[in-house]
Amino acid sequence: MKTFDYVRPTTISDAIAAAAQPGAAYLAAGTNLLDLMKGGVSRPDRLVDVTRLPGLDRIEPLADGDIRIGAMVRNADLAHDADFARAFPAIAEALLSGASAQLRNAATVGGNLLQRTRCAYFYDTASACNKRQPGAGCDARDGENRLHAVLGWSEACIATHPSDFCVPLVALDAVVEIEGRSGRREVALEAFHRLPGDAPERESVLEPGDLITALRLPAEAREFSAHARYLKVRERTSYAFAVASAAAALRIEQGVIRDARLALGGVAAKPWRARAAEQYLAGRKPDAVSFFHAAEAALADAKPSGNNGFKIELARRIIVRALILAAAGTPQRVPALPGSPFSSVSGVLHDA
Amino acid sequence: MNFSISLTVNGARRDIELEDPRVTLLDLLRERLHLTGTKKGCDRGQCGACTVLVNGRRINSCMALAVSHDGTEVLTIEGVAHGDQLHPVQAAFIAHDGLQCGFCTPGQIMSAIGLIDEGQAGNDPERVREGMSGNLCRCGAYAGITDAVLEAQNNLAQSDQRRSA
């Protein structure tokens, strides 16, 4: 690991000033950043520790019914907040399907948005990677790419965004609150991450010094709480990134879908909102035929970026399954194996 | 540039001068404080061998910068027994053969103590397995580990009931 300066400011404005310098990076829990620094992938000259900044660790209902989640709230604390999990069950399920308990105890809401791709060529400093070194080329294109993007990718980069948390968030219209050198602003999560295009090193709309201070969920997002699920296919049942995942949320009245929300994870460089599928579902019956057509619509623009054509069909099937489970109703409690399509009956032994 | 930090480790206050901010909490525990019960497995947050409790919560100490944890309370495997009296989780691991080579065991035990304290798994084996998935065991002692955590959870729940009765 390259050496660095370490500063721990006590106010947001001091943090922004310290992080606006070239070579600076914010440090929250460090569960992704330290890993990247150990591998020489990230080489910051200065770490600006934001873990002690005041006021960023609260989950607070606002007067207008929105809910604000401070950027330093830990993943486990958000997922296990009973009021939050009742109102936003698919978000709690997504959080609990990610990483391990140890990492969820440390990892933060703000850091989750900014985690880097898990593309092996990005991590391997001996490989060519346009994201790590602009203009270097992309060894993933002709490499081991069965887990890479099928939507929104470019010739320059076929990496995916690894977050589970972001998938239901983008489906539910989450907004990112940002403070920077030019003051405060907010950006819809859907517009926060950038597709690679010809500049895959630019992963979000953040400018130097910009600090994510909070996430906000609109009051209307609670209206999906009775029919909301997150489903994630992994190469092992726990502690693995998504091969493909889906967040599905429905508002059903008198046997008809009034409003649908759908987003995909593991398929693109950003959490992928499937608006065409949502529009298709509105006004239809919540049955397998509707869900199948919605899945077709969601993947209409998908194309393999390598040896990963199977992910398109896999994503379709996960969408259908997630919609069926959402229509059946949110479970009373997050399942024992969160997000798993293989979840067994609670309490039953594997080997029984 | 030097950094002065102070930690409470297994109940004792430790004031430490760090010459380098790159030191992880794991390396601080092992190399500076000579608490080598906490193991370095992958050093990348993937195996759980380095699990300790920080302010009562289980984390991977390899993925934590020591300097950022100034002022925290750290509990390691060396701090869980009372003299010769093992912690109930330690005793249960022995009773259920929850180990073979033992390298992952300190991390497993610290993770199990954290899991039981979180109160999310209860006596559901599926939730215990899921909650312990951040701790790898290359010997494959998982069945014994699950049994040990379930028994320790039950014993601790019963002693809690006795205390409140």
Image (tube, coloured by chain):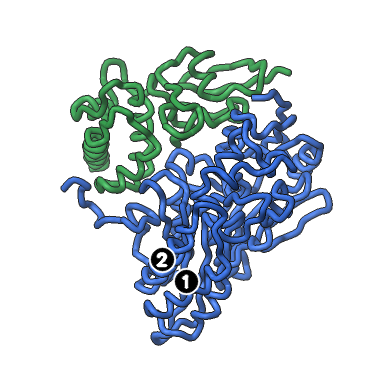
Chain colours: A blue, B green
Q: Quadrant of residue B84?
A: top left
Task: Identify the element where label 2 is drawn.
Answer: helix
Q: Identity of the amino acid at label 1?
A: Ala
Residue A338 percent location from the top left of the image: 38, 54
Q: Mark 2 packing: few (<14 Cα in 10 Å), some, or many (20+)?
A: some
Return the residue nearer the eye: B103 or B124.
B103
Return the residue found at the far front: A142
Q: Name the residue at 70% across, 52% down.
A: A204
Return the residue at label 1. A295
Q: Quadrant of residue A285?
A: bottom left
Q: Mark 1 packing: few (<14 Cα in 10 Å), some, or many (20+)?
A: many
Task: Locate residue A279 relative to residue A243 in the image: left or right.
Answer: right
Of labels 1 and 2, earlier in sequence is 1
Task: Residue B163: tell me if it is visible.
Answer: no
Is the C terminus of chain B in the top left, top right, bottom left or bottom right quadrant? top left
Q: Are marks 1 and 2 in contact (CB under 8 Å)?
A: yes
Residue B75 percent location from the top left of the image: 43, 26
Q: Name the residue at 43% across, 56% down.
A: A232
Task: Locate residue B150 relative to residue A82 in the image: left or right.
Answer: left
Q: Compared with residue A10, is residue A263 higher up or lower down, i.e. above or below?
A: below
Which subunit holds the residue at mark 2?
A
Q: Name the residue at 51% across, 69% down.
A: A262
Tell me how many marks there are.
2
Return the residue at label 2. A317
Residue A111 percent location from the top left of the image: 60, 45
